[in-house]
Image: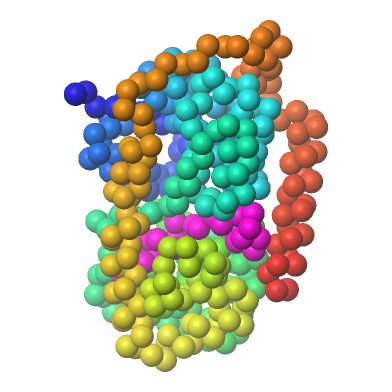
Amino acid sequence: MSATRIVFCGLNLGEPQINTWFGGMYRSFFAALARHGCDVRYSPAGAPQQGDFLVVPVGGGQDRMAARAMARFDGRVILYVPSAQAWFRSSFLDRWRHKILWVYGTDTAEETSRLYRDIGLAYHGMPFASDPRVMRPLGVGEAFDVVFVGNAQSGVGRHAYVEALLAELGRDRVLVVGPGWQGLGYPSQSVAWGPLLNAIYNLGRVCVNVHNLEQWSTPCLRLDANNRLFDLAMAGRPQVCVASNTAAQFFTEDEVAGADTPEEFVTEVVRLLLDTTARRAMAANARERATLHHSWDARAADFANWLPRSKPESRAHTQGWASSLWRLRDTELPSLGPWEVTGKLARRATRLGGSHSGGGF
């Protein structure tokens, strides 16, 4: 039986910074899919290679690229979508329904599943994961009390937690790596996902994971765990995670410590710094859980199981000439019309307003 041919298109991996942060993770996921009987191919934005299934992202300015790829691909399409709180274009989805097999994304909130279910599309929540071959305990000396690797320019809300930590411990005891922290005395720098990042994690007695507020402060609408949650667990690091509801979906309290306010965050960090036994137990528990349930191999097994056993045929275009013209518009004009831009800005303002009120500030 021949391998299922899956073509991943776009993913913004042509941008050096995105490739630095996420390229290694995608390569781990692709390798895991290959172990589950899939022939994975990657195409940059543009004309995709042909295969059994096309995987293409939408949102973040990628809708026109996605439409062009869907128009040129002969088979069925799987959409990789952001949280529905950030992107949900029902008219776009309806126009391309004849090509779409199902959609998936990292958000596990029921609201996202419901919105897709209401328009007749299956949504699969597939959180990030990690690779035990890359993220692992090293047994090196711990040079800092706390290590945090994160982007200050991605979303809002991280500064309050980092500033509270520095006020409690002092800058010399805390290593912060990432873009946007110059105001706190740390140079702007990025580290590629891979062995060097794992080595940095291993330098901390405690590692912290600060989600941006949009990812977690309204859990009924969005529960969007970042990759750091799983990487730190896989690396066997004691972790304090801002976003307790999000962490609790995947780990118990003796595997990852959760906190929601800056005060809770600092208290949990100090507690672990003072208790070596608790730190070591938490690290071992987290590593065990991540290895069993949150590896890229586990995610690839789910993805492969969601695929149909036989290649489905593309549905016929039944939506008439008007919808065909709109599909042509999707491929040739900017991804959002003026009214959609207005709606997107309104949703973003609502999210940010809700984030501040829900985050305890």
Q: Position of residue 115 (x, y in %)?
A: 63, 41
Q: As displayed, is residue 100 above or below residue 250?
A: above
Give the magenta range. Answer: 215-236
**Measuring 68% from the left and 69% from the top, which residue is drawn there?**
359
Image quadrant holding the N terminus, namely top left
Q: Nearer the viewer, residue 19 or 308?
A: 308
* Number of disc labels: 0
Residue 232 belongs to magenta span: yes
Query: Which sits in the foreground, 275 or 151?
Result: 275
Q: Position of residue 294 (x, y in %)?
A: 35, 57
User: Quick one: quadrant of the C terminus?
Assistant: bottom right
> In the rendered image of this protein, does residue 48 appear above or below residue 199?
above
Residue drawn at x 32%, y 65% is 289
- Depth check: give the residue in front, 105 or 273: 105
Closer to the camera, 53 or 25? 53
Query: What residue lies at 77% left-to-right and 53% top-to-bottom?
Result: 350
Q: Quadrant of residue 301?
A: top left
Q: Is residue 36 positioned above or below 234 on the image?
A: above
x and y, in percent, of residue 360 in the image? 70, 74
Whether residue 42 is visible, yes or no, is no
- In the image, is residue 2 part of the stretch drawn in magenta? no
